[in-house]
């Protein structure tokens, strides 16, 4: 602890510890409020303060979103007692729900933060439900009361009704000006229970985050439930039984400060010299190798990719750089999976699996930025299960590998979506969900004007531009949250795009039978506009199996062979034209279509246009 006067070393008595997190819909001001708390508790000096102190990655700061959770310990005195408040910052995006739920499991209480100008949104509810499942004490708080458009009266009533408390219990703060923040910290101490655990029992600590640091290897964030952890002990991971030496242990305040250990209820970090986050998995339980706990804390699962997409370097010679870059990135991102893939159109690349589209975008962004790569990603798709008539089941993560032949059934993943809108948009949302093959569930009125609608939707219909459509059709008022809900069988087919009879693998897509035709027409139309005319005619076709469903033709450039033939004999003209035709026929057989890579890139980038905008949900 190196004599830092601000906080006691480790093993503060649990009675003086409060572990809490802030949960909110995206952009409701979590990080800004966290910044104010850091300042107010003196953890960060005013001159060191920068906006969103806890969002350390450049991308996070630029995009203003939190990707990785972080935990900070802050001292706060109430009635002369020195408390240690552990604040765990959680990501708010639906792609990272698993990380949110692990962070919640490390706390006893949660600040439910709601923008006083916006009111309750879909993620407010989703996070609230997660917090309730974890039995957390909830402190309802309205933020941004400094905004002229804030309507705290109205939203305090809404919030009180939602969680069943008194309107007066809803705190009002401004993360921007700091108003109400000291009172909020007092409430944290007063309302949130102190952690309980058995100091004598075999050690159990839950991993709620792990990040890769270039200099220090993997830094693992834990919350100790029972027993304690001390430097130089040998620890064991309960899911893998792997053992590691504990090289350093400490708390974050807001920089890492080594301590003599961590006791019951404490939150801190461990460093073991492990180089790969996959060996230190979120949700796993840490125990001591010499005195193992019998039962893990539970709740651990492997992250499962929901969306796949091909990633190719624009310059083919960058392939080894891309491979290295992915290897390095995976050290830091346990949920990223990839395997080599080759495409006729795009050359060598990787098929990558992501938690969702935001995750995809972040990975691609980081690869381009941190490794100087220029990349193309193919249109994202979900994972399909194809059951053949002979009972064999194929798991398809790449549409071009969708099997032909006798198919008994195709299954696709579905999600349970919760959509929050002002009641005037109910009809609009129903229409949108119907277009996307949604099945309506229940509908709850949260207040007179706000409704929560439940739908079961195919994931494939949600991941593309669903959120953008929802936003634009509800004039920005709609919000969406969803969680996986198994799979369903559906009438899905593979549509191939053929250029002069040759299949272009990167454009194959699995779509619903009813949408196959419009997808085909759209793709052939788009390609027609992108490929230059050549000496011979080029057919562009969309096909399901051997059945062509759409066709465009790029007409040949015809040299005017009659230019020098003034007037004269019609048979001579005809002869010249015949000769030209024969020449072209020959050319068509031997010549191949010259398609500039830019045409592929353009066609692909517009194909996933909608998805690219789905940054914030
Ligand atoms: N006027 C006003 N603006 C605020 C206040 N708190 C936050 N903001 C603004 O709201 C926006 C979102 O704030 P963030 O703190 O980044 O929101 P967040 O909830 O942490 O967002 P994610 O990290 O992406 O989940 C920023 O532009 C802030 O400047 C406040 O109390 N008053």
Image (cartoon, helix red, strand yellow):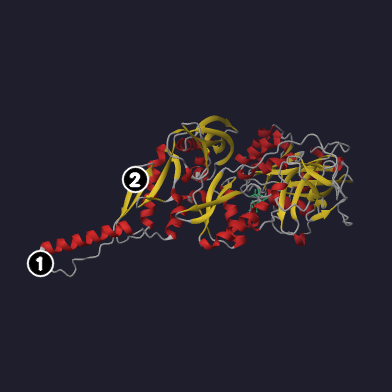
CA gap, disc 1 to disc 2? 42 Å
Q: Position of residue 262 (x, y in %)?
A: 84, 46
Q: Which image quadrant: the N terminus?
A: bottom right
Q: Which numbered dot is residue 550?
A: 2
Relative side of 557 to 219, left or right: left
- For mark 1, what is the residue? 568
Residue drawn where x is 68% and y is 43% of the image: 100
- Spot the residue most to the left: 569
Q: Mark 1–mark 2 contact, CB under 8 Å?
A: no
Q: Residue at x 57, y 52 (%)?
A: 361
Q: For residue 109, what is the image quadrant?
A: top right
Question: 546 or 64, which lies in front?
Answer: 546
Q: x, y percentage for residue 386?
A: 49, 36
Which of marks 2 and 1 precedes in the sequence? 2
Badge 2 element: strand
* Residue at 44% over, 60% down: 598
Q: Which of the pair 542/363 is nearer the observer? A: 542
> Is residue 412 depicted above or below 378 in this figure?
above
**Is label 1 in a helix, a strand or a loop?**
loop
């Amino acid at each position: 602890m190196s004599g830092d006067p601000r906080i006691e070393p480790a093993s503060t008595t649990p009675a003086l510890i409060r572990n809490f997190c802030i949960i909110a819909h995206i952009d409701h001001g979590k990080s800004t409020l966290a910044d104010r708390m850091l300042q107010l508790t003196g953890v960060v000096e005013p001159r060191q303060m920068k906006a969103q102190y806890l969002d350390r990655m450049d991308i996070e700061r630029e995009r203003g979103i939190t990707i990785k959770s972080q935990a900070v310990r802050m001292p706060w005195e109430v009635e002369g007692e020195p408390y240690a408040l552990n604040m765990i910052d959680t990501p708010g995006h639906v792609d990272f729900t698993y990380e949110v739920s692990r962070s919640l499991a490390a706390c006893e209480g949660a600040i439910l933060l709601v923008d006083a100008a916006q009111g309750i949104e879909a993620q407010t509810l989703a996070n609230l439900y997660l917090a309730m499942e974890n039995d957390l004490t909830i402190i309802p708080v309205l933020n941004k009361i400094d905004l002229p458009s804030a309507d705290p009266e109205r939203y305090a009533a809404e919030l009180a009704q939602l969680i069943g408390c008194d309107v007066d219990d809803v705190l009002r703060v401004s993360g921007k000006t700091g108003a109400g923040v000291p009172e909020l910290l007092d409430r944290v101490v007063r309302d949130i229970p102190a952690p309980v655990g058995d100091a004598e029992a075999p050690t159990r600590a839950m991993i709620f985050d792990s990040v890769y640091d270039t200099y220090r290897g993997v830094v693992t964030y834990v919350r100790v439930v029972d027993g304690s952890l001390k430097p130089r002990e040998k620890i064991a991971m309960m899911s893998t039984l792997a053992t590691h030496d504990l090289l350093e242990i400490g708390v974050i305040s807001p920089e890492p400060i080594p301590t003599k250990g961590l006791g019951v209820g404490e939150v801190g970090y461990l460093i073991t010299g492990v180089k790969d986050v996959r060996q230190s998995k979120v949700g796993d339980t840490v125990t001591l190798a010499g005195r193992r706990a019998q039962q893990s804390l539970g709740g651990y699962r492997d992250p499962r990719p929901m969306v796949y997409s091909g990633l190719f370097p624009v310059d083919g010679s960058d392939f080894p750089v891309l491979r290295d870059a992915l290897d390095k990135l995976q050290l830091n991102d346990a949920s990223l999976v990839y395997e080599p893939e080759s495409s006729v159109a795009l050359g060598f690349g990787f098929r990558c699996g992501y938690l969702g589209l935001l995750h995809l975008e972040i990975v691609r962004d980081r690869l381009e930025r941190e490794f100087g790569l220029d990349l193309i990603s193919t249109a994202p798709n979900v994972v399909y299960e194809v059951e053949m008539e002979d009972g064999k089941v194929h798991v398809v993560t790449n549409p071009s590998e969708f099997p032909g032949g006798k198919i008994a059934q195709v299954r696709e993943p579905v999600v349970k979506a919760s959509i929050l809108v002002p009641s005037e948009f109910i009809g609009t949302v129903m229409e949108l969900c119907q277009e996307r093959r949604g099945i309506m569930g229940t509908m709850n009125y949260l207040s007179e004007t706000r409704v929560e609608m439940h739908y079961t939707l195919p994931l494939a219909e949600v991941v593309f531009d669903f959120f953008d459509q929802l936003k634009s059709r509800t004039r920005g008022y709609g919000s969406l949250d969803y969680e996986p809900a198994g799979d369903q069988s559906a009438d899905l087919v593979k549509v191939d795009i053929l250029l002069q009879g040759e299949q272009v693998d990167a454009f194959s897509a699995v779509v619903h039978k009813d949408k196959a035709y419009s997808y085909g027409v759209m793709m052939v139309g788009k390609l027609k506009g992108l490929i230059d005319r050549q000496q011979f005619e080029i057919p562009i076709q969309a096909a399901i199996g051997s059945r062509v469903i759409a066709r465009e033709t790029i007409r040949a450039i015809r040299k005017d062979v009659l230019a020098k033939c003034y007037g004269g004999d019609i048979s001579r003209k005809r002869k010249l034209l015949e000769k030209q035709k024969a020449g072209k026929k020959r050319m068509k057989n031997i010549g191949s279509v010259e398609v500039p890579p830019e045409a592929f890139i353009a066609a692909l980038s517009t194909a996933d246009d909608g998805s690219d905008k789905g940054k914030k949900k």
